[in-house]
Structures are given as structure tokens and as C-alpha cells.
């Protein structure tokens, strides 16, 4: 996971090493051997709170790449871990914190690959729906040129094209355009080729009046 910014980075809180078992009401003990609870991280990739200075004013990027909720067994270990990774952010926005001061910045956006579609595919969708409905956030629902909201181009019919990548700005911010870069054949050929070569995930952007 990487964050590129043309604005200076003021501070970083890195939660990537936070233990799954330490999350309040976590599911870790249900699907993890006792000897692993003291070492198994919650976040399979990374989770950061990054303060970026925009014209001297801090804007917080809550960046996350959650576990893929598949490739496990009937115990649904990866699905439970993904749900707790998403629930981490709901708790963080509610004032809980794994360390240090509680989060209280007014200007921020939660963004990244959350790896769950609110309606289709695998995953514990309740955790995602709760996050999308959180009072501190808004969901601008970025769309493709055809109006669809999918952000990942996966094999049809299963799992199919799903919305798994999100930018969720603070509820108090004014939001403009919100798009998914999903070429439909009307763009230059090299753009479509570049997008498909880069990843099966598509770029998502949201304009914020800040």
C-alpha cells in the first residue's frame, strides 16, 4: 500500500501492527489458535491515519486495505477478519483508539480497498453497511460512465464485477464529482490498455471542496 501526495505529510499514525485479538469484541479467538493470538495482526496489509497539510490545513487520510473475505473454509476466518478490519474504523470514528488520543479531526476521508460489496459477492456485509452509514461519513457512490458502481473487474459470473474500493469523505465536507475510471471504449486505446494492465481494480476519485 502506498500514499502519494503533492502536499506535505505532517504526521502518521500506523495501526498496521495492531493485534486482532485486541479489538473490542473481536472474532479472533473464534478462528485463531491460542498461540497465535499474541502475534496475529488485525490488518492483513496496512491501516494508517495520515495528516496531510493542504495550504497549512490538516486533512486526514484514513487509509486501509482489508483482507479478502474468501479463500478460507466454513469457519469464514477471512470473512470475520475483514469484518473486524472494517469495524476498526467505525470504532475509531466513534472515539475508541488503539493508542494515543481519540480521533477528532473534522476534515478527513476514509479510503482504500475494503474488499466487500454492499450487495453482492462474499463477505460480512453488515460491517460494511454500518461503516457506509456512519454518521461521520458520507458515501458519494462514485460511478462509471455507464452509471455502475463496480470498482473491480473480476471473472464473470463469479465473483463478477464488484464495488470493493471506496472513498468516504467526512460528512461535513462538500463533495463534487465522484467517478470510477472504467474505460468504455470511447477513450484513447492506450488508456483502456493501461487501466486493464495496471490492475483488476479501477481508479476511484472524489472531488472535495476543502
Image (tube, rainbow, N blue to C red):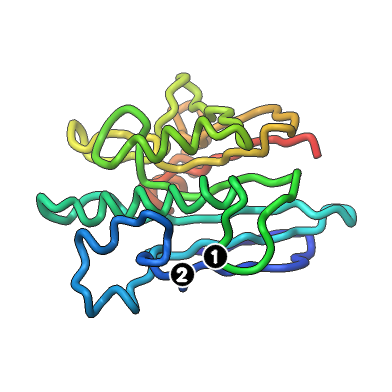
Provide residue 21's location: percent of width, then percent of height. 35, 66
Q: How many marks?
A: 2
Does 195 sit left or right of 200 as displayed? right
Examine the image and state in which quarter residue 78 appears: bottom left
Tell me the number on the disc at residue 182: none
Residue located 51% across and 26% down the image = 143
* Nearest the eye: 46 or 28: 28
* Nearest the eye: 113 or 191: 113
Provide residue 116's location: percent of width, then percent of height. 35, 41
The answer to whether the residue labelled 1 contacts the one labelled 2, judged by CB atoms less than 8 Å apart, is yes
Front label number (1 vs 2)? 1
Q: Earlier in the sequence, mark 1 or mark 2?
A: 2
Q: Quick one: which residue is furthest to the top in this view? A: 147
Instruction: Name above or below for residue 119 compared with residue 111.
Output: above
* Nearest the eye: 194 or 17: 17
Q: Residues within 10 Å of mark 1 (few under 14, many from 20)?
A: some
Provide residue 120's location: percent of width, then percent of height. 28, 30
Residue located 70% across and 29% down the image = 175
Residue named by callout 2: 18
Tell me the number on the disc at residue 98: 1
Determine the secondary structure under disc 2.
loop
Residue located 44% across and 56% down the image = 65
Q: Residues within 10 Å of mark 2 (few under 14, many from 20)?
A: some
Residue located 37% across and 40% down the image = 152
Provide residue 63's location: percent of width, then percent of height. 56, 55
Amino acid at each position: 500500500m502506498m500514499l502519494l501526495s503533492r502536499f506535505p505529510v505532517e504526521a502518521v499514525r500506523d495501526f498496521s501492527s495492531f493485534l486482532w485479538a485486541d479489538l473490542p469484541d473481536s472474532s479472533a479467538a473464534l478462528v485463531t489458535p491460542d498461540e497465535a493470538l499474541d502475534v496475529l495482526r488485525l490488518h492483513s496489509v496496512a491501516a494508517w491515519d495520515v495528516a496531510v497539510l493542504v495550504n497549512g490545513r490538516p486533512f486526514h487520510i484514513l487509509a486501509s486495505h482489508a483482507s479478502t473475505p474468501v479463500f478460507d473454509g466454513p469457519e469464514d476466518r477471512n470473512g470475520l477478519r475483514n469484518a473486524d478490519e472494517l469495524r476498526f474504523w467505525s470504532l475509531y470514528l466513534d472515539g475508541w483508539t488503539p493508542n494515543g488520543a481519540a480521533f477528532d479531526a473534522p476534515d478527513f476521508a476514509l479510503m482504500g480497498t475494503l474488499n466487500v460489496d454492499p450487495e453482492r459477492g462474499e463477505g460480512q456485509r453488515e460491517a460494511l453497511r454500518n461503516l457506509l452509514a456512519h454518521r461521520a461519513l458520507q458515501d458519494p457512490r462514485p460511478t462509471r460512465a455507464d452509471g455502475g458502481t463496480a470498482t473491480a473487474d473480476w471473472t464473470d459470473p463469479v465473483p463478477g464485477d464488484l464495488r470493493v474500493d471506496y472513498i468516504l469523505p467526512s460528512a461535513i465536507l462538500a463533495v463534487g464529482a465522484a467517478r470510477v475510471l472504467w474505460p468504455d471504449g470511447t477513450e484513447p486505446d492506450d488508456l483502456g490498455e493501461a487501466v486493464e494492465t495496471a490492475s483488476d481494480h479501477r481508479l476511484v476519485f472524489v472531488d472535495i471542496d476543502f
